[in-house]
Amino acid sequence: MPRVSNKANKKNYVYGLDIGTRSVVGTVGYKDRERFVVVAQEIKEHESRAMLDGQIHDIESVSETIREVTLALIERIDTPLTQVCIAAAGRMLRTVTVHADLELDDERSVVEEDIHLLDSYGVEKAYETFLEEQSDADEVKYYCVGYSIMKYYLNDYPITNLENHKARKISCDMIATFLPDDVVDGLYKAVEMAGLEVANLTLEPIAAIELAIPEQFRMLNIALIDVGAGTSDISITKDGSIIAYGMLPVAGDCLTEDIARHCLVDFNTAESIKRAIEDHSEVEYKDIMGLTQKISRKDVLKACEEHLESMAAQVSDKIRELNGDKPVSAVFVVGGGGKIASYTDRVAKHLDIPKERCALRGEEVMGNIDFQQKNAEKSSLMVTPIGICLNYYEQSNNFIFVTFNEARVKVYDNNHLAVVDAALGAEFSNEDLFPKRGRSLEFILNGEKKVILGKRGESSVITVNGKPADITTPIHKNDVISVIPGTAGEEGSQIVGRLPELRGDIHVKYEDQILTLPKLAMANGELVTSGYEIKQQDRIDILNYYTVSQILEFMDIPKEYVSYIAVNHENSDMDGKVYDNFTLSFTLGDTTQINADSQKSFE
């Protein structure tokens, strides 16, 4: 293959690797405004079945295949390749969709820190939900390898961008994706052993959708099926965003195994037969006995019938499940495993949509792709490899290592990593990143619940590489991050005398004078002074009346000297209630004795 001469753009080359179950596909290209130029491609099949169902089983063997693809591309483009973009297969992909809310202290403008906090709450909630739903979460270490915001909300109304808008509450709908650590580590190890460094990691369904369903089509309810050798990865779009990801561990290899059993051949020969019937009505081959045989396309499809039908049924059921138990409007199929005849028709039949709306996509979706290499592959097999390169420009995703409070932490780089992301990776409590309010005081006042907020404490003290920072400070690989947790403020407190409801007096008419009486308060049924400090769950009642007995006590008149009582000119007793502006009358006994008792008390 001749070398490609493109000196002006060599420094902008992006190298993408699709490490598949059957083969490794390498693509080198660069972005030229709105177009992507593919400079070179290289495809090499694994020598053995080093990968099964999208999972690396023989790291050394896969690494050797990667090395051979890389060397071939280096020779062709006459440029060293040291960094590579890769995609993880969805064999063990887990997704969680959550809704997260963040209440602000008061109505104010939303700042970047608020959005970071909302996103981190969403990821934390997704991880908690994931742990509750996954039975193997304790046995297998999972990482959140990325999340997509489906919608933001401002005071419960959908909005595209929250920043700078005034709000009391901000919210989001988020889809978070999780993969086992060994899936990611296996990919990284194979790439590193081939002498490369991972520049970007994405998920295969995300990479495929990057090219197959452009942004302007995502308003439509479309499913994308990336049918590989070991897995069928599914993405679904609707209302302008990706709403779901899914995976099934059934794909092209199960059909190859059917052919191998039917024709009595090894796996590689069966794979050759499967590919040959795409362009030929009859294929010649040698079986394990060394005998030359022929088989028609019709007979090959008949041998695969059961699994082919099962694949179509399973993927259709999965699409319905991910799409709210409803069929999508259209289906795009990419990947080598979906090229076999009748697959798309079967999927359309199971989804009950017109067969014209389920189609294999290859060159049709490459309108913005230019190929410099002669006889370049432009089939559905190349959608994901090119999508891996394109995803690099959308967001540079990669795992990096940082030191967080003296612990080594692996963090998924989503191209805008900040201290808050490292804190999540270290399972550092979100609450410790921010000043915490002291415990709120909750009590019942006149039958209604009241809350006195605690005071804010001190903010966390954050440094990155020894320099002052905050939760939005960008971080990079090998950064050293220190976070001293924020402190809690004083608990909420209140004394009865400061309650607004205690303001004002009660006025009572007695003879020719007006008695001015301060309002009384009761705590849990007992009279208390204005200096009483309210306790958690106290029941406070502010009385808007006095009893006759309480007024006599206020006037220092012993009750035993009172012989007749009237409230508002009606007979009453010591327990009679006297409200504001009521009239109180009573008759006293021997006033001489009263005065004598008072004098004696005074002495």
Image (spheres, rainbow, N blue to C red):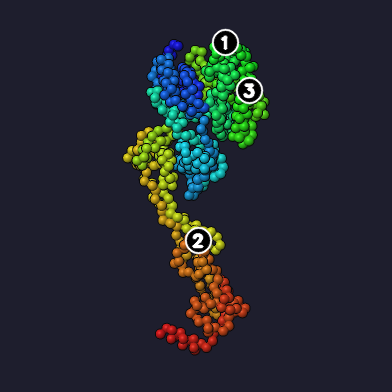
Judging from the image, what secondary structure is the residue with disc 3 in?
helix
Residue assigned mark 2: 537
User: Which one is closest to the eye, mark 3 or mark 1?
Assistant: 1
Name the disc covering residue 292, or none: 1
User: Which one is closest to the eye, mark 2 or mark 1?
Assistant: 1
Left or right: residue 61 versus residue 256 is left
Q: Quadrant of the N terminus?
A: top left
Q: Quadrant of residue 269?
A: top right
Q: Quadrant of residue 399?
A: top left
User: Which one is closest to the eye, mark 3 or mark 2?
Assistant: 3
* Among numbered discs 2 and 1, the one appearing first in the sequence: 1
Kind of residue sitting beneath label 1: Thr
Left or right: residue 588 versus residue 306 is left
Determine the residue located farthest toward the left in the rendered image. Answer: 466
For the point 42% across and 14% down, the residue is: 76
Kind of residue sitting beneath label 2: Gln
Q: Quadrant of the C terminus?
A: bottom left
Residue 498 visible? no
